[in-house]
Image (cartoon, grey):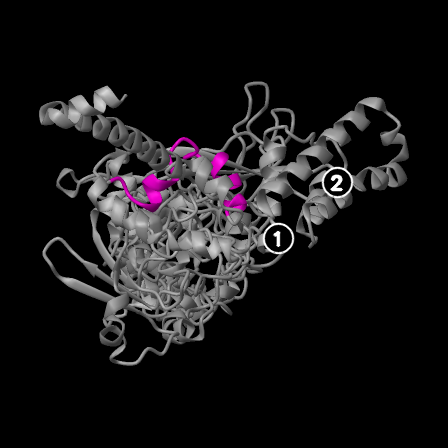
């Protein structure tokens, strides 16, 4: 050794080489040791086990999606060593806090690196994620632990805006959003700022926070740009609530669902407060005693005991992973910003209370981030989920729609939605969704007084009603817009413009048959639909001649003003069967061949009475049929009708018509039946005049109602001679019968001045040349009215 030292001291070169080797070896050892220490202190095991304050976080981390990601990658960032070393040295102070037990419980992170230095090193923020189906299984607290499934389509979205995909949940990453939180855990965010692609700034303020005008300026140091961690703050350290934890293990069959009330009992023991894990474990184990006492028969089955023991072990595991009494940590201590049920989460900003100066809200709308929840009960099939929102009304695009929709609810909703039990939670319709109405939304601002005050004026609407029924058969009239389009006969409301004719009957039920009052004429309430047309249409196509709104014949109702004749038959159809004068169809059964057909009663007349006489020379109907006529007056409701209107309804009789003016329904006889000779009542129209008219123009001499010659019927009282030929025409030929001749016999040539008293020779009882018996009572002055001297 001395020799070596002597040699080295005498030879500086050897000394330098040897020294260098020593330095390299020692340096290498120190470097290797330093690297080892660096690596170890950066390991998750060191973070989670060396420091006794970390068991809660480390336990949750090991069962998280990031269990293979080192703690330092998120807490120090994935940057260069030169950046990380100073940051790590700074965190050495926590070692001193741990050694001196000078730390808070529970522990909260204070200085997490921004997502662009952590999350975005692995997750590309420009990546677009397609929609994905989620099935959330809930179990009730009943004896059967009944399962309810909620189907959601999650709209993760994202992607670059230049590709048109900056939408969905990850819209917040592609767009620039800033906020100011007033609490340590960022649960209270009264101010939000959005900067669009053109640099335009939109500010939103919580209207319930009563912020001072200089709030933003005074808190500018707290202004933070939103990133991944603002929502995914507990992605690696999740503590499930007892309710969620039980749903989780039941859905994965880690606990048997056939154990009675296991959901309720599990939530009960997990929600209780214990001083330690051991105390909690003992309480959970006492569940076995409860089942032995309350379900003795069930408990006696060995297989059930095994299921129960497995469930108890699972409950103890859940508690050990979610509650740490010694660190004051439980599922409620660290807010989880994913979702909006147990913590504010999304509703920190999307609560309906954040309004811009223009009173536009940060949208509180279910289907921005996911589809409308579809709730399915036990044994029900999976629902059909609508991903797109076709024909969304403008009202739904209102940024305050979710807060407003309960006040805007009316029959128009039924065009797209089933509205049974609106606001309920029995899942019987779209509007009774338990995932919406069966949840207490503690963190949404739907009931905030400041919001309600703003919405009140807009919600004063008519009471909720049932869509009007279609008062006519639809059949070929499926194009409802013919009558109900804007500016048409009966226009639909302006908010119906987005609907097409195929959607009408989705809300408005169709009445198939007319409803008739039980007896008597139908009241307006009893008549369903337009009245049928009680007459043939041939020659009567212009309905407005009689039925214009201001017409004196049979005017249409005032609300028909402006309708044209071509629209009438869109609603009013010809009566399919004979219709009584009341305008309602009769239900007279069709007789069988063996049954005699009875003559119809006057009530069975079809439409207006036919004209029982030829029209030639009788064109002025009002001579006999004016309302105040003494001949055969028209009904009082015909007042004001002119002669040119009469034949619009009344047509000449095509077949022999009785004097009553009504057609008979005499059945056509079969060949085996004799045809009876028509009776006098079957004569067509008024009797013809059986004598020449020359010199006999004053018909009333012989035919006055009280005449003794040939009186007219009593209903002819008051008619004048000039009216007689309006109905009675001269016979073109002699009438049947031996005694009926073309004219009365002429007087034989004798001076009239001598024989002025015709009755001396021609009285009915005279012995000379008596007159016929039907001349009884005729006077002398009437003789020459008919009998003329021979020329």
Looking at the picture, how far across and down is residue 732, in whole percent? 31, 44
Q: Nearer the viewer, residue 355 or 625?
A: 355
Q: Nearer the viewer, residue 451 or 595?
A: 451
Between marks 2 and 1 in the image, the one whose residue lies nearer the viewer? 1
Q: Which residue is mark 1?
A: 326
Looking at the picture, how far across and down is residue 350, in whole percent? 36, 58
Q: Which residue is mark 2?
A: 261
The residues colored magenta run: 54-78
Name the residue located 44 percent from the left edge and 68 percent from the top edge.
462
Query: Is any atom of residue 498 visible in this view?
Result: yes
Q: Within the magenta stretch, is there residue 71?
A: yes
Name the residue located 34 percent from the left edge and 43 percent from the top edge.
74
Position of residue 350 in the picture relative to residue 306 (left or right):
left
Query: Is any atom of residue 239 visible in this view?
Result: no
Q: For mark 1, does the 10 Å Cα neighbourhood hold few (<14), some (14 to 19), or many (20 or more) residues?
A: few
Name the residue located 28 percent from the left edge and 62 percent from the top edge.
179
Image quadrant where one finds the C terminus: bottom left
For mark 1, give the secondary structure.
Answer: helix
Task: Find the distance from the CA under tag 2 to the CA under tag 1.
Answer: 30 Å
């Amino acid at each position: 050794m001395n020799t070596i030292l002597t040699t080295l001291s005498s030879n500086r070169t050897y000394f330098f080489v040897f020294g260098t080797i020593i330095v390299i070896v020692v340096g290498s050892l120190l470097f290797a040791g330093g690297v080892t220490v660096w690596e170890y202190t950066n390991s998750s095991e060191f973070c989670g086990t060396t420091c006794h304050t970390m068991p809660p976080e480390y336990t949750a981390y090991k069962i998280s999606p990031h269990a293979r990601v080192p703690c330092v990658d998120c807490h120090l960032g994935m940057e260069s060593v030169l950046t990380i070393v100073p940051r790590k040295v700074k965190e050495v102070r926590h070692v001193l806090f741990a050694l001196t037990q000078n730390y808070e419980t529970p522990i909260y992170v204070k200085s997490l690196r921004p997502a662009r230095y952590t999350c975005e090193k692995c997750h590309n923020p420009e990546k677009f994620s397609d929609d994905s189906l989620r099935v959330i299984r809930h179990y009730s607290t009943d004896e059967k632990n009944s399962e309810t499934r909620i189907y959601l389509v999650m709209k993760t979205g994202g992607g670059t805006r230049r590709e048109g995909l900056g939408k969905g949940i990850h819209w917040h990453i592609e767009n620039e959003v800033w906020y100011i939180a007033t609490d340590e855990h960022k649960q209270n965010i009264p101010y939000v700022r959005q900067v669009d692609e053109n640099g335009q700034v939109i500010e939103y303020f919580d209207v319930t926070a009563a912020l001072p005008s200089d709030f933003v300026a005074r808190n500018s140091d707290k202004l933070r740009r939103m990133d991944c961690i603002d929502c995914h703050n507990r992605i690696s350290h999740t503590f499930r609530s007892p309710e969620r934890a039980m749903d989780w293990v039941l859905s994965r069959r880690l606990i048997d669902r056939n154990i009675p009330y296991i959901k309720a009992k599990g939530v009960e023991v997990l929600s209780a407060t214990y001083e330690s894990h051991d105390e909690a474990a003992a309480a959970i184990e006492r569940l076995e005693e409860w089942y032995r006492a309350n379900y003795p028969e069930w408990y006696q089955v060995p297989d059930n005991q095994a299921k129960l023991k497995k469930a108890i072990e699972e409950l103890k595991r859940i508690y050990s992973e979610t509650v740490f009494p010694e660190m004051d940590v439980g599922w409620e201590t660290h807010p989880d910003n994913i979702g909006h049920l147990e913590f504010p989460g999304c509703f920190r900003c999307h609560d309906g209370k954040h309004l811009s100066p223009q009173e536009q809200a940060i949208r509180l709308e279910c289907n921005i981030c996911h589809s409308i929840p579809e709730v399915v009960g036990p044994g029900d099939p999976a629902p059909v989920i609508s991903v797109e929102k076709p024909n969304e009304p403008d009202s739904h695009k209102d940024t305050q729609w979710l807060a407003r929709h309960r006040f805007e609810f009316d029959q128009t909703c039924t065009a797209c939605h089933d509205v049974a039990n609106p606001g309920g939670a029995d899942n019987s319709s779209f509007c009774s969704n338990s995932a919406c109405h069966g949840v207490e939304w503690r963190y949404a601002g739907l009931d905030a007084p400041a919001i309600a005050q703003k919405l009140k004026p807009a919600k004063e609407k008519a009471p909720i009603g049932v869509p009007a029924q279609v008062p006519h058969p639809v059949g070929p009239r499926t194009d409802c817009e013919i009558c109900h389009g804007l500016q048409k006969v009966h226009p639909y409301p302006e908010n119906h413009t987005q609907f097409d004719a195929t959607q009408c009957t989705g809300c408005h039920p169709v009445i198939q048959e007319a409803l008739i009052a039980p007896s008597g004429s139908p009241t307006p309430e009893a008549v369903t639909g337009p009245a049928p047309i009680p007459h043939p249409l041939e020659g009567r196509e212009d309905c407005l001649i009689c039925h214009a709104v201001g017409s004196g014949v049979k005017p249409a109702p005032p609300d028909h003003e402006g309708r044209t004749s071509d629209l009438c038959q869109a609603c009013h159809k010809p009566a399919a069967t004979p219709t009584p004068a009341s305008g309602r169809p009769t239900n007279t059964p069709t007789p069988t061949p063996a049954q005699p057909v009875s003559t119809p009663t006057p009530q069975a007349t079809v439409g207006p009475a036919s004209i029982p006489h030829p029209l030639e020379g009788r064109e002025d109907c009002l001579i006999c049929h004016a309302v105040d006529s003494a001949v055969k007056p028209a009904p009082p409701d015909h007042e004001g009708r002119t002669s040119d209107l009469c034949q619009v309804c009344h047509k000449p009789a095509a077949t022999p018509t009785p004097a009553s003016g009504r057609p008979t329904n005499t059945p056509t006889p079969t060949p085996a039946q004799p045809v009876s000779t028509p009776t006098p009542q079957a004569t067509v129209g008024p009797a013809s005049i059986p004598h020449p008219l020359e010199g006999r123009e004053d018909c009333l001499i012989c035919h006055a109602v009280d005449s003794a010659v040939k009186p007219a019927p009593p209903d002819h009282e008051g008619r004048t001679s000039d009216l007689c030929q309006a109905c009675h025409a001269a016979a073109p030929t002699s009438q049947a019968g031996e005694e009926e001749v073309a004219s009365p016999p002429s007087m034989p040539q004798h001076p009239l001045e001598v024989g002025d008293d015709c009755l001396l020779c021609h009285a009915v009882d005279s012995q000379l040349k008596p007159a016929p018996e039907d001349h009884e009572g005729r006077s002398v002055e009437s003789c020459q009215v008919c009998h003329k001297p021979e020329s």
